[in-house]
Image (cartoon, grey):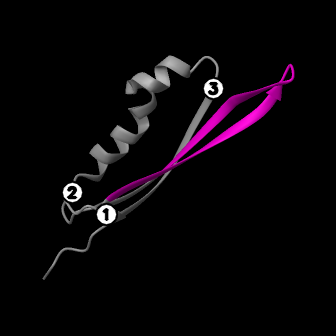
Amino acid sequence: MESDAISVEAEGTNEVVDRIIVLTKIHVHYTLRLPAGADREKADRSLDTHVSKCPTAQSIKNSVEITWSADIAEAQSEK
């Protein structure tokens, strides 16, 4: 797998709650380049379940809203 095949950006939102700045939201955006012939369904399943399988997300899920998006590109097979 090439080193630039997976990248992620995360953005947090802070809000003032009772005069205290609090992290209230995190949005994670994945960019994936799948190799030719890769199982796209596996990648989709992994993304669909990543929040429920992530220990950090599970630790903060009751106080921080976590959302995600992804751009997935499939490499063209060489002929």
With 61 as the anchor, is 56 left or right in this view? left
Sort mark 1 into few (<14), some (14-19) or many (20+) by Cα contacts within 10 Å. Answer: few
CB-based contact (under 8 Å), mark 3 and mark 1: no
* Tag 1 residue: 4
| Amino acid marked by disc 2 | Ala
Marks 2 and 3, Cα distance to the nearest angstrom? 33 Å
Residue 19 lies in magenta, yes or no?
A: yes
Read off the residue under disc 2. 38
63 in magenta? no
Q: Image point 25% across, 74% down: which residue?
A: 76
Measured in 3D between alpha carbons, the distance from the residue under mark 2 to the one under mark 1, in whole angstroms, is: 16 Å
Q: Residue furthest left?
A: 79
Residue at position x 27%, y 70% in the image: 75
> Mark 3 is on which residue type?
Val
Label whose residue precedes the other's in the sequence (3 or 1): 1
Q: Residue at x 55, y 21 (%)?
A: 60
- Measured Cα–Cα span from mark 3 to mark 1: 29 Å
Q: How many discs mark residues in the rendered view?
A: 3
Q: Main secondary structure of the magenta part?
A: strand
- Which mark is first along the chain, 1 or 2? 1
- Which of the two residues, 32 or 9, is positioned nearer the viewer here? 9
10 Å neighbourhood of mark 3: few (<14), some, or many (≥20)? some
Tell me the kind of residue under disc 1.
Asp
| Quadrant of the image containing the N terminus | bottom left
Looking at the rendering, which quadrant does residue 32 occupy? bottom left
- Report x, y in % for residue 23: 67, 30
Boundaries of the magenta span: 6-29
